[in-house]
Amino acid sequence: MPLNDTQSEYQALKEELHFHNYRYHVLNDPVISDYEFDQKLKHLKAIEEAHPEWVTPDSPSQRAGAPPLAQFLKVEHPAPILSLGNAFGETDLREWHARIARLDDRVEDADFTVEPKLDGLTVVLHYHNGTFVQGATRGNGEVGEDITENLRTIKALPLHIPISVDGPPVPEVLVVRGEALITKADFEALNQRLEEVGGKTYLNPRNTAAGSLRQLDSRITAQRPLTLLVYAIVHHEGGEIPTTQWETLVYLRALGFPVADASTLCSTLDQAIALCLETDPEAFPFEIDGMVIKLNDLALADDLGVVGKDPRGAIAYKFPAQEVTTLLRDIGVNVGRTGVITPYAILEPVEIGGVVVKQATLHNFDFIHDKDIRIGDRVLVKRAGEVIPYIIGPIEDVRTGAEQSYTPPTNCPSCGEPIINPVGEVAYYCTNSACPAQLVRNLEHFVSRGAMDIVGLGINIVNQLVQEGLAHDIADLYHLEPSHLLALEGFAEKKAENLVSAIQTTKTQPLWRLIVGLGIHGVGEVAAQTLAERYHDLDALSRASQEEIESIEGFGPNIAESILQWFNNEENQAVLGKLKASGVWPSAERRGETGPQPLEGLTFVITGTLPTLSRSEAKTLIESHGGKVTGGVSGGTDYLLLGENPGSKLGQAQKRGVPTLSEEDLRQLIKDRSA
Ligand code: IVH
């Protein structure tokens, strides 16, 4: 097709493409389809091929990257690219305000902007007569590196301002500052694509954005999902620019720059602080590491000057860190209840969000291999919310060569028996079912709150019971006598008697708790309750067929198979025999026969320090036997459980004539009422 477009038609097409690019990448609100855009871009490129002399650096065709550079040139910034002072809480923010209010009276009545503190890479963008001509990194704040070609590939960066003909006038020279970044969603998608093709994944959006902009070959940068947000004018020549920070944001947005939506004008410090404290970084589509409070009056901010590289007129409120780097000292392994061996990181202790972290999960052995994690590496560790801290990956750039590759152990660290890694599985297993580490986990699970709930039997005691050979399986717990326990650390007669009695009282726990306690793979509380409703006791359950279990609502073939396997195992059969012989054999009927739980209908109040139980353990003991615990003595209180140094509740109980019980009396009461 012959091209007979005029230069003005070419110009109009360029503007149209800029506009659609802006709708898509800045406003996230496109008005044409990707296909239509591509067609228009194709047309533009065809015109440019016919008229290479028309092409300018701000053409929409110039975003694909240019031939590689030999090195980055230096760029002197027109004004210092300052940093920000940090505040880690409300006190720091108020101190900052008090400090600057002492320097200048105007601060007292000043208003502020509060903006997200973007966790990206600072960029300085130069526009001459509205055309993007140069872009630089921050460097040392005075001189940065020329990354113009890389920045040109960022679609959210306007190559020409203002974006629309009715936009505000632009000074001859305008230099703006912002952050280049990658959104969380784009980062996830990028890593997923890499994973699919077996490539190496990236650590986090920030490092990926920084790495992408440091490419000498901008065609690589063009492949990365970088975006941009701007927040300041560094310098201008000719024309006029706003005098407040808020108007600056409005102005930059009107020119066609991407500006963070979540920026707020606050008329008081209290309002600004409240906003900082209540902002949830998780709610943002990109990573932010804090909020920035800035004096709105730019002349006032300027007059206040700088301390070192930090302007006095602004401060960064930093969220508690979630990700930090530290030294990976070693890799340890855990043996789980089912013999699964999992690796964990032993770290140089490091504070993350107010908690000292010494260990973190490494997920599984494949993860260590895939990420090429080596002992001695600096690693990136994340701790967010309630999840266990985990390793994201190594910082390969700071390797010294002394780091050591890791090979998974071939023998169980607990019992020394061989470890196997079944073909096609991620998991590694210890093959020894009598492995003490497995036994410890099994017992721990059996006595836990969600299973048999044996009050006062913690991991420490479980460890000792296994070490001393007092428990070889869960059934052995019911053969323990006070004299056995006296050999353990911290046990005197009373404590030994109490623990034995606590264990014995769990013989009457409902069937579902025993089923949970067996530790059948895939059978948690909900499944156990369903099974207990359906099967009269463990004998009945052990006779169930695969099809029968599969026919139960919510039970699939995997869980049915796992139940059958458990009951078909000879060692498990032996344990069941021992449990039955010891009278640990709850049944649906028996529950009915014995009627209500021993403490059913009784309400207790607890005060003072009890000899062996913590308050929450005492509460659990009462509740697991059907009783109720309330916070204060009232007409409905049946007993006051009384320890040493009681509080005012004792007086209240005496006034009302409520009888008191010692911890021992309580155990006796449970026994008497269970009989
Ligand atoms: S204002 C005088 N505003 O955080 C202006 N900086 O830790 C000083 N940053 O070097 C900077 N988001 O690169 C400002 N909304 C924001 C920001 C922001 C991120 C960066 C900036 C600065 C660093 C300081």
Image (cartoon, grey):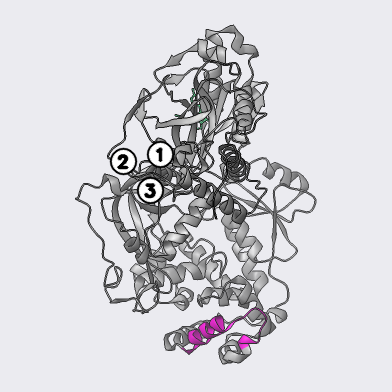
Residue designated by label 1: 149
Q: Is residue 221 above or below residue 194?
A: above
Q: What's the amino acid at mark 1?
A: Glu
Q: Is residue 408 left or right of residue 463?
A: left
Q: Secondary structure at mark 3?
A: strand
Residue designated by label 2: 69
Query: Which quadrant of the view contains residue 23?
Result: top right
The Cα atoms of the two marked residues, 1 and 3, are separated by 30 Å
Residue designated by label 3: 380
Cβ–Cβ below 8 Å for labels 2 and 1? yes
Q: Is residue 212 in sight in this rendering?
A: yes
Q: What's the amino acid at mark 2?
A: Leu
On whether residue 553 falls in the magenta region, the answer is yes
On whether residue 139 falls in the magenta region, the answer is no
Dot 1 surroundings within 10 Å: few (below 14), some, or many (20 or more)? many
Q: Is mark 3 within 8 Å of ligand 1?
A: no
The region drawn magenta spans 549-568
Return the disc, 1 or 3, that comes first in the chain's sequence: 1
Determine the residue positioned at 56% across, 12% down. 300
Q: Is residue 260 above or below residue 209?
A: above
The Cα atoms of the two marked residues, 3 and 2, are separated by 31 Å
Residue 304: x, y in percent? 50, 12
